[in-house]
């Protein structure tokens, strides 16, 4: 005899952050393995399997599509009925159930050129809030993951942000968009901040930049113009590792009115978060 309510309890357990984290890790690792087995763009003729999106420098490869197809197929098997939103194949966030947010290759330009700094990113969210996420760096095999309220790990080891307490001694990560006009504004802001921090790094993957903050490899990260799939998993990793995190919100949401700009993505160790945010405001972050 099945006790009343046991079905609801099972459904609740299946939707727990821990259960969703396990699935995110599983499918992200499978996707990374799949990507490692695909032909590499830098081994073929220039332009092989490569198209552009918003600008001539905003590229998408056949591998992006192949990885997202795999992710969607696996999630359809493991989580039938859930909504999926992906960078390459689209999707609309609707309803109050679990949404899977996918970036098949975050850092596609790096991947295109044969640089190792790109990642597969998988997040589970409800009502725009990330519950679980996994980020895999295929070139190294490293796995970052987190579940809401359960902490973050790198290859199973707990993560904690740096203890830096002075902005002048902080290592700042950043990135640039694809619009030439916006790049000018972004470079102006970074140029203003550069003399005020230890140094600046730019890897080309928002997901890996956020994970670097979580690991204490950098102290902060600021970029404008990132999309939901860029940060849905990695922002949770950074937050669960102790970072102060500010995200622009999923498509259509109202961003915080904090003077950093509507689509600013910011994560920092607590000891420098307020100071760095204020420096960014003073130097025009809202206008980027």
Image (spheres, rainbow, N blue to C red):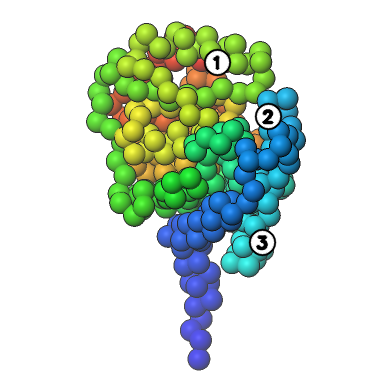
- The residue located at (34%, 39%) in the rendering is 215
Q: Position of residue 135 (x, y in %)?
A: 48, 47
Q: Which residue is mark 1?
A: 186
Q: Secondary structure at mark 3?
A: helix
Residue where numbered disc 3 is placed:
73
Circle 2 SS class? loop
Query: Along the polypeptide, which appears first: circle 1 or circle 2?
Result: 2
What residue is shown at x 49% (from left), y 38% (from top)?
Answer: 116
Q: Nearer the viewer, residue 142 or 97?
A: 142
Q: Please tell me which residue is depicted at 31% across the width and 30% down the height of the picture.
A: 270
**Residue 7: assigned label:** none
Q: Is residue 116 visible?
A: yes
Task: State if disc 2 and disc 1 touch (CB < 8 Å).
Answer: no
- From where the camera sits, is residue 222 visible? no
How far apart marks 1 and 2 lie (CA) works out to 17 Å
Of the image marks 1 and 3, the number of the one nearer the N terminus = 3
In the image, residue 43 sits, relative to residue 282, either above or below, namely below
Image coordinates of residue 277 in percent, x first then y, are 41, 19
Disc 3 crowd rating (10 Å Cα; few below 14, some 14-19, many 20+) is some
Residue of label 2: 58
Q: Earlier in the sequence, mark 2 or mark 3?
A: 2
Q: Residues within 10 Å of mark 1 (few under 14, many from 20)?
A: many
């Amino acid at each position: 005899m099945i006790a009343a309510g046991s079905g609801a309890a099972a459904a609740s357990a299946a939707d727990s952050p821990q259960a969703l984290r396990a699935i995110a890790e599983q499918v992200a690792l499978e996707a990374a393995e799949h990507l490692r087995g695909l032909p590499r763009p830098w081994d073929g003729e220039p332009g092989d399997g490569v198209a552009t999106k918003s600008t001539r420098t905003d590229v998408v490869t056949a591998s992006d599509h192949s990885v997202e197809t795999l992710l969607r197929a696996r999630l359809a098997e493991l989580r039938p009925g859930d909504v999926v939103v992906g960078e390459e194949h689209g999707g609309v966030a609707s309803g109050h159930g679990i949404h899977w947010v996918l970036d098949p290759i975050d850092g596609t330009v790096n991947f295109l050129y044969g640089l190792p700094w790109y990642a597969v990113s998988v997040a589970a969210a409800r009502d725009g809030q990330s519950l679980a996420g996994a980020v895999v760096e295929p070139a190294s095999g490293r796995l970052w993951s987190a579940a809401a309220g359960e902490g973050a790990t790198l290859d199973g080891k707990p993560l904690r942000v740096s203890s830096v307490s002075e902005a002048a001694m902080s290592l700042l990560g950043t990135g640039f968009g694809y619009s030439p006009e916006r790049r000018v504004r972004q470079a102006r802001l970074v140029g203003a901040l550069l003399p005020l921090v230890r140094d600046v790094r730019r890897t080309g993957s928002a997901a890996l930049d956020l994970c670097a903050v979580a690991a204490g490899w950098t102290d902060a990260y600021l970029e404008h113009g990132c999309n939901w799939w860029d940060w849905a998993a990695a922002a949770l990793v950074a937050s669960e590792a102790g970072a102060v995190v500010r995200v622009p919100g999923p498509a259509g949401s109202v961003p915080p009115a904090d003077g950093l700009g509507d689509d600013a993505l910011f994560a920092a160790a607590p000891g420098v978060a307020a100071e760095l945010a204020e420096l960014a405001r003073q130097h025009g972050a809202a206008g980027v």
